[in-house]
Image (tube, rainbow, N blue to C red):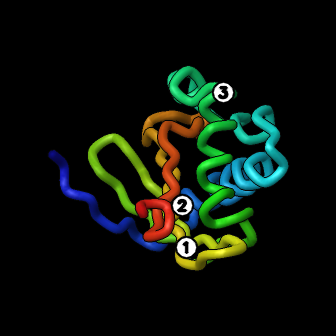
Amino acid sequence: MAQETVVSDDVKAEVLAYADPIAGNVMQGFNEGNYTIYSRDFSPEMRQALDEAAFEQNREFVTSRIGLYESRTDPVVTETGEYIAVTYRGEFEREDGVALRLVFQKDDPSHRLHGLWFNSPMLRS
């Protein structure tokens, strides 16, 4: 398994140029319960793995525990093998410091989302 390493500031700036708007779309779609906006930047594999029914289930699970999304800060950009991950510190109505992790494939010029996770103590309990 490849080691996860933090990228240089130059690479971070390049990645955030496309990751920030995608994170914005995902979280807007999440808050609105709008799968079309939420999944707009998904890779075909991701769209198949996280279809609209799964989105609705996941959204219900997350909002019932920590509420709606409010903001994100402090992105950390790391790379592992062929993937780049951006992890934000997210604030939700009932919990701060929720890890919002978006994963992209390095060699994908379309910057499609290949992975998406929300993680926090309240989501794990």
- Per the image, label 1 sits on a secondary structure element best described as strand
- Residue 48 in percent (x, y) is at 56, 20
When asked about the image quadrant of residue 74, the answer is bottom right
Nearest the viewer among 12 and 49 is: 49
Of marks 1 and 3, the one in the foreground? 3
- Marks 2 and 3, Cα distance to the nearest angstrom? 21 Å
Q: Indicate the amino acid at tag 2.
A: Leu
Q: Which mark is residue 89?
A: 1
Image position of 117 (left or right of 111): left
Mark 2 or 3, nearer chain start:
3
When asked about the image quadrant of residue 91, the answer is bottom right
Image position of 69 (left or right of 82): right
Nearest the viewer among 97 and 61 is: 61
Query: Measuring 34% from the left and 68% from the top, which residue is drawn there?
Result: 6
Within-10-Å neighbours for mark 1: few <14, some 14–19, many 20+? some
Q: Indicate the amino acid at tag 3.
A: Ala
- Marks 1 and 2, Cα distance to the nearest angstrom? 6 Å
Residue 11 makes an appearance in the image: no
Q: Which residue is mark 2?
A: 100
- Marks 1 and 3, Cα distance to the nearest angstrom? 26 Å
Query: Measuring 47% from the left and 67% from the top, which residue is drawn there?
Result: 120
Q: Which residue is mark 3?
A: 53
Q: Which mark is residue 102?
A: none
Mark 1 or 3, nearer chain start:
3
- Residue 18 in percent (x, y) is at 65, 52
Q: Mark 1 and 2 residues: CB-CB less than 8 Å, in contact?
A: yes
- Which quarter of the rendering shows the C terminus? bottom left
Q: Indicate the amino acid at tag 1.
A: Arg
Q: Mark 1 and 3 residues: CB-CB less than 8 Å, in contact?
A: no
Residue found at the far left of this picture: 1
Image position of 40 (left or right of 16): right
Within-10-Å neighbours for mark 3: few <14, some 14–19, many 20+? few
